Amino acid sequence: MPPVLQGIFTIIIGVGGCVAYFYFSNLVLDKVIFPARGPNAGRNINRANKVRPWLFLFPAMFALGLYLAYPVVGSFWRSLFDRSGNNFIGLGNYIDLFQGSTFRTAVFNNLMWVLVVPAMATFFGLLVAQLTDRLKWGNIAKSLIFMPMAISFVGASLIWRFVYAANPDIGIINALRDFFGLATLDPLQVRFWNNFFLMFILVWIQTGFAMVILSAALRGIPEETIEAAIIDGANPFQVFFQIKVPQIMGTIVVVWTTITILVLKVFDIVYTMTGGNFGTHILPSYMMTYMFRDDGRATAVAFVIMILVLPVMIWNIRQARAEMR
Amino acid sequence: MADLKLTDVEKAYGEVKVLSDINLDIKQGELIVFVGPSGCGKSTLLRMIAGLEKITGGELQIDGMVVNDIPPAQRGIAMVFQSYALYPHMTVRDNMAFALKLAGKSKSEIDEAVNRAANVLQLGPYLDRLPKALSGGQRQRVAIGRSIVRDPKVYLFDEPLSNLDAALRVATRIEIAKLKESMPNSTMVYVTHDQVEAMTLASRIVVLAGGGIAQVGSPLDLYERPNGEFVAQFIGSPAMNLLAGEVVGTGQQTTVKLAGGGTAKADIPTTDADMGLKVNLGVRPEDLVASDDEEFLYQGEVDLVEALGELTVLYFKPEAEGAAPVLAKLAGIHAELKGRNVKLKADPSKIHLFHNKVSLLYR
Ligand SMILES: Nc1ncnc2c1ncn2[C@@H]1O[C@H](COP(=O)(O)OP(=O)(O)O)[C@@H](O)[C@H]1O
Ligand SMILES: [Mg+2]
């Protein structure tokens, strides 16, 4: 069978299966299990209505359980075994992790990423959103700044490899150094600062996201509150920081936490740029170094990441809900 | 506390002129109301006075100083918006204190001003609430309080009551009237499309129409001596009836023969040259009374009766399909008149005459 037909066939079976599930399960509930006939008709209708939501929720809950709950439990279980997966070693993987210096570097670096990237991306996003708001060519500027969002992390990393290239004919940084008569160096090998060079790639990508969301939020601010503040004597900075920013605080928090969660997942940039060398590992890239070699260790790292993300995630969802009200 | 002077003020958005030839002298202590149909430029004019909209021609003076290019905060004005425009993230107290804080006033000065305003507007119990925990009427009072604390020269109101329900609107209107009474020296400019607000609040009304000022005058002036058909029909509800006719007698009183067969005398002086002049006779529904004698101003078949208890509104069958019906407002209950033929007359002092839409009094 040609692939196209195969695809269509799959879609038909999938969609048809879903429709059939809802239709027939509902039918069975109403006609067979709690029929609206006989002496108990009234009671049966009530019972059927109590069961119906669960009936309709079941597929979603089942899928979530299968693809979300089971992997969490399964990963945790796996992280308690050694490399081969046969010998139970308790928290051995975790203990080893916390004793290793690379893991500690990765945790420290990740902390920096979590502090710097969301802050910078949100700040730049807000800045661009505000500055381009009234400009005629603001939308063009915004499109340009949003564009990196459409590039994969690996693609973006490849672009930035050129920027950081240790060759004044290719890399901007070394071209500039060359211009001022400084010797060529490899930015990615400059200890400590190389982390910031990597972070900047993600900031470059995520600024567009922050900008789009915050731009919409800024436009949602009632114009009259701004005019009232102008009449009250506020200068542009006061209008921005005392009237506009407080009114979109909820959105800023959502953007900030969303990027934070993303930061805790991104391994591609480090993986592509330095492979974690020169002291640039972060937890996800560190996890990747163990993946398929020592799944016990890798899942242990994964679990640490999950525990770090969890509180941010809860806060994020709370804020997003409050925003929607 | 200031005079306001507008000289040849105009506003254009690009090529489109929305206001022109605005000349207006507002004296200290007046409450001026701008009225006019929607889209006639009331808000635009108010926002030009506030400094939120650029004045594209002419001159605006506050207290003798040209302020065309002076930013809003330094004009000594305060504005109350239709949508209240409270800062949603600040408590009532902070909303009112914001301008004073920006001006660098001391804490004690700010507290005193805020508490004084809160007392006047009975906002004391709500000072630490956020705007979203207030009712519409309370919010608008906070907005008014926010302008009071600044002790401005001129208060500007842009349809402040339009977002309130009918009962609250009346209550808040009375509060604004009292507020004005308690500050007899303050100058206020008030925009509304509601003529009841205009009639009850204004010391003078400015009727805006067609990109300019149609007439300026005290409320009763506009009611009794409108300068043209537009103002005549805009002020008063239901609107003034207009009946086509021709001048047949001149002198201290003018006699008009109407197209519908009636005749009427008006206390409006005319000269022999006016003989045969085509005019529109205007008479307000409330000035019409039933007539038993031979002489009548209008006669027609009653199409619809609205009995409101203290008065009855009669809608007469229009002469032609689609023409505006003649209305009469009679005191008392007259439900039995539906379908009957009724003759009406009016006192000569209540008759208005217009030629080419302009009142004969203002030729
Ligand atoms: N920014 C603008 N650009 C172009 N025309 C405008 C603008 N703002 C208002 N107008 C026009 O100016 C006129 C007056 O508007 P406005 O003052 O809001 O009327 P009102 O308050 O009397 O209802 C309207 O016809 C409106 O279409
Ligand atoms: Mg308006």
Image (tube, coloured by chain):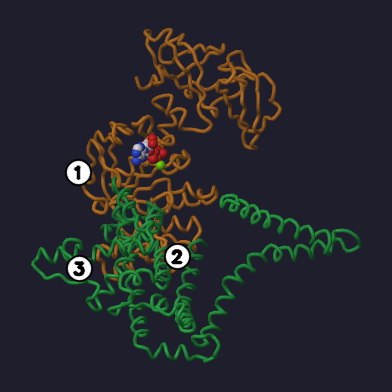
Drawing shade for chain A: green
- The amino acid beneath tag 1 is Val
Q: Which mark is residue B66?
A: 1
| Residue A256 spot, x, y in % from top left | 39, 68
Distance between the alpha carbons at the discs numbered 1 and 3: 63 Å
- The amino acid beneath tag 3 is Ala
Circle 3 crowding by C-alpha within 10 Å: few under 14, some 14–19, many from 20: many
Dot 3 falls on which chain?
A: A
Marks 1 and 2 belong to one chain: yes
Q: Between residue B336 and residue B259, name the one nearer to us.
A: B259
| Residue A294 spot, x, y in % from top left | 46, 82
Drawing shade for chain B: orange
Q: Nearer the viewer, mark 1 or mark 2?
A: 2
Q: Which mark is residue B130?
A: 2
| Residue B73 spot, x, y in % from top left | 26, 54
Residue farthest to the left, as pictured: A181
Distance between the alpha carbons at the discs numbered 2 and 3: 57 Å
Dot 2 falls on which chain?
A: B
